[in-house]
């Protein structure tokens, strides 16, 4: 057996092409041989904590286009962004299959709300000229409404990777999930693929929270009448399904200033959408504030004199 | 991976078509029998042509070999063009269709020209199999609407409810040859049990008859893909549910802003080719179109001319009558 497991969970495997020793980290499924460049895929036995992906979305954006898109995103971050972004050196542009849980359920919701129905009233008033005039005024009549809202919830994605937190993944969503294929190791060579590192139950709880948010938005659109307020709802989610999928993400690190830490830019590997925490330039903001204050001062002085 | 034969979704009981990854109704992943893996396995993908190691190329969407530029494609998703499943036979022949048209023309009413049945000449008769879907589904429909029942100062009052509905054999027209109105008129007149799962022999052009040329039979095909068909059917279900709710479940006499959300179970869709005759007849130098159901000679829909003279006479008589009454009232 040419596989040996170390205590840290990393595996040392023999490259099937040239026989060299390759170390596969515990949280990865793939490794590139440093000597011959071939990509090995490691399939570990399924455990309760670590499962095999069911579906995967293949990469559509290739490396050169990803680099170009990240550079374009860095250059277009706005007037208050750090000036070093335009010329930032891109280190480490890597294509990673990020593990995520795909969640679906049946949502049964009870809601209550107050619905406003508009009606017009003609009223007379005394104008500034002393004569009586009439005008039409729109008023709202408020009524109580209670009901049920049942529907399927589908396509909720929650990151299962410690390295890519869920809010960063959401910044590059949406993915077009119609492009998903059944997971096959043939999608992985040449790419980095992570094993899930977050607990399934924690991800399920996160998915619940996302679903509650979506239900709030759907219910707000579902309300009749001309306006609504006090929309409250309670939902129970049953028949849940949660499957592990792999999502394509380009991860790059941009070093824009020698003193500051680099900024991580994520790019959706299917749609090319980029996201990251934009570092702002303190000097530019200070200058803008000073300019604004000076303008206000000048106007005040002009009116005072 | 071994594919377990799953025919119905475990959650919503809708049939799953071959090649589907997720249920079309509730998006649950179609399960497959998991491979039990005991050991760690290390895989390396090799090119079938030159044995070099290959990588997944996003541009090619498959495993591409850098040395001999051959590509091994991944199994592609099935999104095929929809194909007819059941063909219904014609039970009405050409002569019966012509006779049906004449019967229909004679029964249209008094405002048509009196010589319509006699003078109409059938110019063209084309047998057509037009395509449509039918669906059966159980839907739990949650609805909200404004209605005039219980309204106070405002004209509308809000209502909400939830109702279980069942739809059977609802027809969705997929035809380019017939309009939606014509399809709606023909729906319900077919014997859906008489279908065959093999396409019938489509006869070539028959001889020209004295009563009008018979054009070669046309067998329509579905020209949408499965994913587009599903979207259309799901939106038709929502529309049908909204119609039923507005008619029967929202209280009051007027409704507005009827919104529905449905939880579907057991959505079964079938794809049909339904027989009909498309006819063109000529009356006084103008062509009119009529469609006869291929299984029921009593079902005809189409356009027919109005008699302008008769309409003018009736309007004149009515106006004269009103004028006489007014004169009498004024004279008193």
Image (spheres, coloured by chain):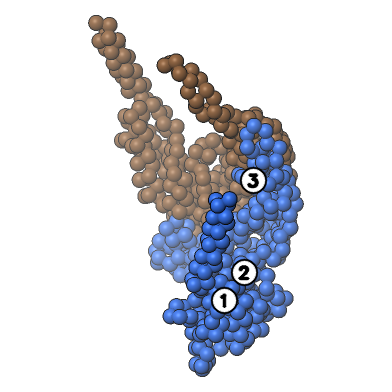
Chain colours: A brown, B blue
The answer as to whether the residues below labels 1 and 2 share one chain is: yes
Residue in view at x 62 percent, y 69 percent: B185
Quadrant location of the N terminus of chain A in the rendered image: bottom right
Q: Work out whether B7 lies above or below A63.
A: below
Q: Could you tell me which residue is drawn at 44 percent across and 44 percent down? A: A273
B92 vs A58, left or right, is right
Report whether B329 appears left or right of B59: right
Toward the viewer: B294 or A56?
Answer: B294
- In this rendered view, identify the residue nearer to me: B198 or B45: B198
Q: Label 2 marks which chain's residue? A: B
The kind of secondary structure element at disc 1 is strand
Compared with A103, B303 (above or below) is below
Crowd band around label 2 with a 10 angstrom C-alpha radius: few (<14), some (14–19), many (20+): some
Give the residue number, with chain letter if any, for mark 1: B291
Q: Residues within 10 Å of mark 3 (few under 14, many from 20)?
A: some
Q: Disc 1 or 2, which lies upstream in sequence?
A: 2
Q: Which mark is residue B255?
A: 3
Instruction: Give whichever of discs 3 and 1 has the lower sequence position.
Output: 3
Cβ atoms under marks 1 and 2 closer than 8 Å:
yes
**Residue A280: percent from left, percent from top:** 38, 26
Quadrant position of residue B25: bottom right
**Is B209 rendered above or below residue B199?**
below
Residue reaching furthest to the top: A305
Q: Of callouts 3 and 2, which one flags the residue occurring earlier in the amino acid sequence? A: 2
Which numbered disc covers residue B185? 2
């Amino acid at each position: 057996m040419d596989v040996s497991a170390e205590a840290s969970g990393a595996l040392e495997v023999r490259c099937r092409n040239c026989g060299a020793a390759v170390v596969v980290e515990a949280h990865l499924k793939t490794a590139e041989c440093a000597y011959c460049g071939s990509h090995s895929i490691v399939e570990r036995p399924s455990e309760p904590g670590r499962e095999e992906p069911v579906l995967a979305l293949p990469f559509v954006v290739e490396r050169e286009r990803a680099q170009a898109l990240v550079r374009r995103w860095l250059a277009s971050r706005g007037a208050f962004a750090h000036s070093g972004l335009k010329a930032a050196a891109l280190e480490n542009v890597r294509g990673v299959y990020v593990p995520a849980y795909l969640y679906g359920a049946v949502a049964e919701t009870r809601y209550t709300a107050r619905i406003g129905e508009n009606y017009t009233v003609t009223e007379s008033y005394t104008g500034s000229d002393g004569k009586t005039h009439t005008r039409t005024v729109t008023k709202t009549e408020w009524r109580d409404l209670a009901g049920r809202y049942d529907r399927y919830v589908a396509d909720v994605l929650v990151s299962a990777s410690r390295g890519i937190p869920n809010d960063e993944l959401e910044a590059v969503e949406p993915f077009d999930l119609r492009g998903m294929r059944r997971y096959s190791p043939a999608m992985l060579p040449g790419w980095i693929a992570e094993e899930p590192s977050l607990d399934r139950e924690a991800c399920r709880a996160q998915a619940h929270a996302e679903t509650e948010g979506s239900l709030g938005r759907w219910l707000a659109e579902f309300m009749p009448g001309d306006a609504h307020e006090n929309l409250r709802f309670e939902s129970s989610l049953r028949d849940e399904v949660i499957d592990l999928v792999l999502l394509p993400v380009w991860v790059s690190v941009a070093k824009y200033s020698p003193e500051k830490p680099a900024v991580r830019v994520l790019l959706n590997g299917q749609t090319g959408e980029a996201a990251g925490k934009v570092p702002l330039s303190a000097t530019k903001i200070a200058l803008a504030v000073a300019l604004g204050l000076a303008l206000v001062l000048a106007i005040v002085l002009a009116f005072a004199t | 991976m071994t594919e377990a034969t799953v025919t119905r979704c475990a959650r919503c009981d809708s049939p799953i078509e071959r090649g589907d990854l997720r249920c079309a109704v509730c998006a649950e992943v179609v399960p497959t029998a998991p491979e039990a893996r005991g050991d760690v396995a290390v895989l390396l993908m090799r090119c079938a042509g030159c044995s070099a190691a290959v990588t997944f190329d996003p541009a090619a969407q498959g495993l591409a070999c850098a040395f001999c530029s051959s590509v091994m494609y991944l199994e592609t998703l099935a999104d095929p063009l929809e194909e007819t499943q059941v063909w219904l036979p014609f039970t009405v022949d050409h002569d019966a269709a012509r006779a049906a048209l004449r019967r229909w023309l004679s029964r249209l009413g008094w405002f048509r020209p009196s010589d319509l049945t006699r003078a109409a000449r059938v110019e063209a008769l084309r047998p057509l199999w037009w395509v449509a879907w039918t669906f059966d589904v159980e839907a739990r429909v949650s609805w909200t609407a404004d209605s005039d029942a219980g309204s106070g100062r405002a004209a509308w009052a809000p209502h909400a409810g939830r109702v279980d509905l069942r739809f059977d054999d609802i027809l969705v027209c997929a035809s380019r040859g017939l309009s939606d109105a014509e399809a709606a008129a023909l729906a319900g007149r077919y014997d859906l049990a008489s279908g065959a799962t093999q396409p019938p022999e489509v006869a070539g052009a028959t001889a020209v008859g004295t009563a009008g040329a018979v054009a070669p039979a046309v067998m329509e095909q579905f020209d949408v893909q499965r994913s587009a068909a599903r979207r259309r059917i799901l939106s038709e279900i929502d529309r049908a549910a909204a119609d039923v709710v507005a008619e029967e479940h929202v209280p009051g006499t007027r409704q507005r802003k009827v919104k529905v959300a449905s939880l579907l179970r057991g959505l079964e869709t079938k794809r049909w080719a339904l027989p009909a005759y498309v006819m063109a007849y000529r009356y006084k130098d103008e062509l009119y179109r009529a469609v006869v159901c291929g299984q029921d000679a009593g079902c005809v829909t189409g356009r027919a001319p109005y008699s302008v003279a008769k309409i003018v006479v009736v309007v004149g008589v009515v106006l004269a009558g009103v004028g006489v009454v007014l004169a009498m009232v004024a004279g008193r």
